[in-house]
Image: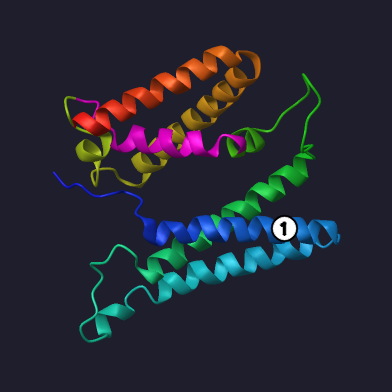
């Protein structure tokens, strides 16, 4: 089978760097009481990136010696980055509508958006393992079902995966807060298993 990273350094390093840039700019705008203006600019930028990436997606077909067969495709990055920005705006709108406190009081109401954001690394790794992990007799869900779902089935699978990741993030966050030794032991055990698989496979 193919052996390459599902998330190579480029263009995914760009997502990380832009994420840090947006976070710094958001904090600065919030300190200056210009948070809504920043979010509006974020929405416009996201829409522009999404539409621009889609409109120019076929431009490489008309450039001599150009090819789509590259991992770090500029228009791929723009389109996906636009989606990420729009999702970020949607999360901000949801948090504002729900009036979610940044640090909820103990035992108080919490937001799944904050829970997932605090455990973003866990969700990042877990959803990749769920989709691409070779658990089913050496085959992954992607290998078995990839390219076979229609719109309805794909939407349903996305909702199931999203709900599972939200539940997993909330559970992992609760475990780290209430059962620190158990969470630490689970982390070390997981790291050992993955190190073993990395060396032996």
Relative image position of residue 151 (x, y in whole percent): 36, 47
Report how many numbered discs are placed on residues in the image: 1
The reply to whether the magenta stretch includes residue 122 is yes
Residue 114 lies left or right of residue 30; in this view the side is left
Q: Nearer the viewer, residue 44 or 31?
A: 31
What residue is at 34 percent from the left and 65 percent from the top? Answer: 72
Q: Evaluate whether residue 27 shows in this view.
A: yes
Relative image position of residue 88 (x, y in whole percent): 61, 52
Snapshot quadrant of residue 99? top right
Residue 86 lies left or right of residue 62; in this view the side is right
The way the protein has been coloured in the rendering is rainbow
Residue 194 to residue 54: above or below: above
What residue is at 44 percent from the left and 32 percent from the top? Answer: 160
Residue 99 lies left or right of residue 79; in this view the side is right
Q: Nearer the viewer, residue 150 or 55?
A: 55
Of all residues, the one furthest to the left in this rendering is 1
The residue under label 1 is 26
Quadrant in which the C terminus is drawn:
top left
In the image, the segment drawn in magenta is 118-136
Q: Secondary structure at mark 1?
A: helix
Residue 82 to residue 65: above or below: above
């Amino acid at each position: 089978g193919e052996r390459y990273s599902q998330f190579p350094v480029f263009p995914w390093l760009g997502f990380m760097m832009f994420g840090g840039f947006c976070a710094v700019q958001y904090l600065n705008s919030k300190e200056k009481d210009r948070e809504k203006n920043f979010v509006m600019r974020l929405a416009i930028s996201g829409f522009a990136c999404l539409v621009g990436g889609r409109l120019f997606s076929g431009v490489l077909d008309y450039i001599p010696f150009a090819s789509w067969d590259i991992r770090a495709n500029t228009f791929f990055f723009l389109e996906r980055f636009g989606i990420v920005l729009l999702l970020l705006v949607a999360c901000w709108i949801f948090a504002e509508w729900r009036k979610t406190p940044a640090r909820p009081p103990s035992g108080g109401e919490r937001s799944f958006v904050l829970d997932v954001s605090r455990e973003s690394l866990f969700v990042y790794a877990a959803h990749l393992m769920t989709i691409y992990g070779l658990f089913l007799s050496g085959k992954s869900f992607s290998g078995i079902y990839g390219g076979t779902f229609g719109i309805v089935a794909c939407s349903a699978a996305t909702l199931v995966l999203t709900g599972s990741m939200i539940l997993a993030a909330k559970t992992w966050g609760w475990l780290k807060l209430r059962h620190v030794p158990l969470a630490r032991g689970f982390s070390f055990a997981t790291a050992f298993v993955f190190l073993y698989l990395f060396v032996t496979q």
